[in-house]
Structure formats: structure tokens, C-alpha cells
Amino acid sequence: MRFQTILRRTFLATILSLSATLIAGPALAANPAEDFVQTNIHKGLELLNNKQLSTDQRRTQFEGFLLGLTDMKRIADFTLGQYRRTASPQDLTAFETAFQNYAVAVYQSYFAKYAGQSLKVTGSQQRSSDDFIVATQLIDPNDKTGQQPLEVDFRVRTDSGKPVVVDFSVAGIWLALEERDQFTAFLGQNNGNIHTLIAHLSDLAKQFRGN
């Protein structure tokens, strides 16, 4: 199904960026947003390298790490586009839960596939007093082609009282924007029925978990 394929590819691209974030080396941070990304690089590194944890324990802790790094509710609401305005509070809550479960399942499925990559913070752009774009480069130490490193950017907001990632960009493609386009297109084809989208995301989450 085209919708499922695009979702998988989009989340896979995001996994690439997030997994790289987890295993990058230290860098000097120039502002709170860069410092936030840098700090979480070290937290992720410690988590992935903790051999005393079982696979299930690492996955559970990774989920907590992921939910502490991102604002899943904010991202989920954004991806509904205009359909968020007409959704009932109950449907909105159900969708936010389904989106989070799906996102975590995909991240957990792919996060180990990119071990060995590194991410270098190269700077940032301050869009407003609480809105930053942190620019990074994805470095593959085994790449002998001489190609330019892949650019991975993180949008960090600080308006909620603490820094959180609200979007990722891989090679210029922003995840939340892509998800919004795909979700609203799906809903447009299904009479705006959020329950249909919830069911689809729930099925995909089960597939990624292998049950």
C-alpha cells in the first residue's frame, strides 16, 4: 500500500537521524538547543553501550529516552492538519496514543541498524526566541566514496519550559510535514474517519513489533 510504504520510508529516514544522534561524539554547543542535542547524544550513547541491559530493558529505556527527547503529542496533533479542528477530544486522545505507539515501535525496530554512524553538530538557526533549527551532518566512517555527509536537522522548541524536538529533517525532508501530508491525504480518502487512521497505525505498530 502506497501510504504504508511512504510511512515506512519516512520513519526509516527519521530513525537514521535519531540513531545517529544516539551514537555521535561530543561537540561544543553554542546555544541551549545545540546543548540539548549534544547532551542527548551522550545519554543515548550510554544506553546503547550498556551491555548489562537485556534487549527488552534497552528497548524499554530507549522508549523512555525517546519520549523524553520529543514532544509526541505536539507532533501527533500537527500531523492531523485541518482534521484536528473537527476531531472530538476522545478521538484526538486515541490518535495521539496510536501515533506514539506506532512511532516508538518503528524507532525500536530500526534503531540498532545504524550503529557505527556519528553525527556532528555544525551550527544552528534561531527562528524565534524559542524556536531553533540545529544543523548536523551524518558521518559514516566506513564510507570511502568521498561523498558529502548527509545533512540531518532537528527543530527544537523551548516554549514548553524545556527543550523538545518537534521535527526532524533528513536531506531536506521534514518528517512532521511529510506525515501531515500523508495523514491528511489518507483521511481525505476515508471521509475524514480518524478511527480508520488509528486502526491502520495500530496494525503497523504490531507488524514492527512482530506480533
Image: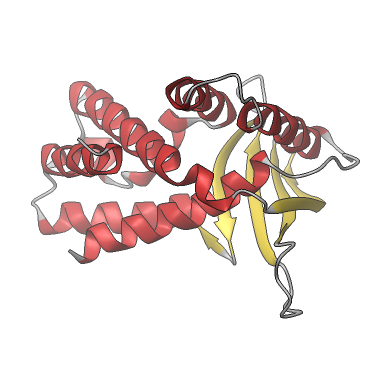
Kindly identify the residue that appears in the image at 71 percent across and 80 percent down: 145
- Name the image quarter holding the N terminus: bottom left
Which image quarter: residue 177?
bottom left
Which image quarter: residue 39?
top right
The number of numbered discs placed on residues in the rendered structure image is 0
Q: Position of residue 102 (x, y in %)?
A: 32, 38
Q: Looking at the image, is 8 positioned above or below residue 156?
A: below
68 lies left or right of 55: right
Q: Position of residue 117 (x, y in %)?
A: 67, 54
Kindly identify the residue that appears in the image at 11 percent across and 43 percent down: 196
144 lies left or right of 198: right
189 lies left or right of 48: left
Q: Is residue 150 visible?
A: yes
7 lies left or right of 170: left
Kindly identify the residue that appears in the image at 38 percent across and 43 percent down: 106
Q: 88 or 36: nearer the eye?
A: 36
Q: Position of residue 209 (x, y in %)?
A: 29, 37
Q: Is residue 177 visible?
A: no
Which image quarter: residue 137?
bottom right
Q: Position of residue 12 (x, y in %)?
A: 44, 55
